[in-house]
Amino acid sequence: MKIKLVYESNYNFLTKTEWVNLITFLISKIESTNIGSMLINQLNHYSDMGHIVTIKNYSPHITNQYPHIKINTTNGYFRNTIYIPDIPYFINVPVFNKELIELQTETIIHELLNSTPLATNLDNDFVNSFSKFEYQPYVITLFHELVHCLRSFNNIASDGMLEEYSTIYGIQGNTLIIDGNIITENSFRKEIGLMPRLSHGSSDDYIYKVTRDKDYSNQFLKEKFYQFI
């Protein structure tokens, strides 16, 4: 693995060792899949070319820490930083409600289930009609940000929500493809047995020092970082 891990002491909810072990575990989970191994191999390939991928636990540029990526270039080389906080940032995202789609015959539903890029983004009416909120595992959160990173290396990163749609379910002509394989959050979800995500929207599950109506022990929250479903 040629991705750099950098821990900065701040909140210290996870110690440096705990955070490094978490990120290493998540990357190993990603690499254990077909889609994930292609993603990591391509990132390593670009690292050999002089580009840099760094994962950090803390961004000094924002107050409320959340997973995201900063894409930068210096002298023609990318210097990308992915932020995966060492504090709980647990969310739920809208995914296909399997009970509502079993009898549906719409082409777009089959495209989503097969991880086929769409002609355009899904509208709110469709998302609201066919989705339910489920926990977003941290392994998918990291995979999502790594896709953004590789998309930038391939010079197909877009602005605004088009980038999110292309990363989550793929938009025709703007989707990351490696050796004929579609690389999106949903193609990864499909491989690990989870339903497709339908939008970039989310609802809070538990946010460190923000959520007040749930009283979880630190040990429970630390274990939740590893929750797969």
Image (spheres, rainbow, N blue to C red):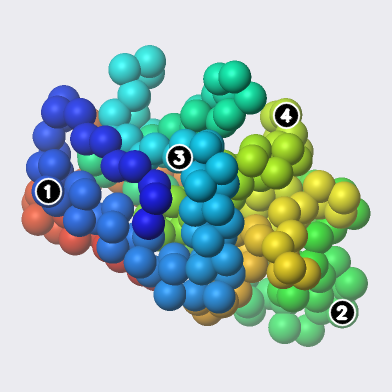
Q: Amino acid at mark 2?
A: Thr
Alpha-carbon span between mark 1 and mark 3: 20 Å
| Residue with the mark numbered 4 | 159
Of mark 2 and mark 4, the one earlier in the sequence is: 2
Of mark 3 and mark 2, the one earlier in the sequence is: 3
Where does residue 210 sit, x and y in percent of width and height?
28, 31
Query: For residue 53, which numbered disc appears in the image?
Result: 3
Reply above or below: 219 against 195: above
Instruction: Name the quadrant containing residue 99.
Output: bottom right
| Residue with the mark numbered 2 | 105
| Residue with the mark numbered 1 | 17
Reply above or below: 88 against 181: above
Mark 1 against mark 3, which lies toward the viewer?
A: 3
Alpha-carbon span between mark 2 and mark 4: 32 Å
Of mark 4 and mark 1, the one earlier in the sequence is: 1
Q: Residue at x 19, y 60 (%)?
A: 223
45 left or right, relative to 110:
left
Instruction: Name the quadrant containing residue 158.
Output: top right
Examine the rendering and report whether any part of residue 128 can be seen. Answer: no
Quick one: quadrant of the N terminus? Answer: bottom left
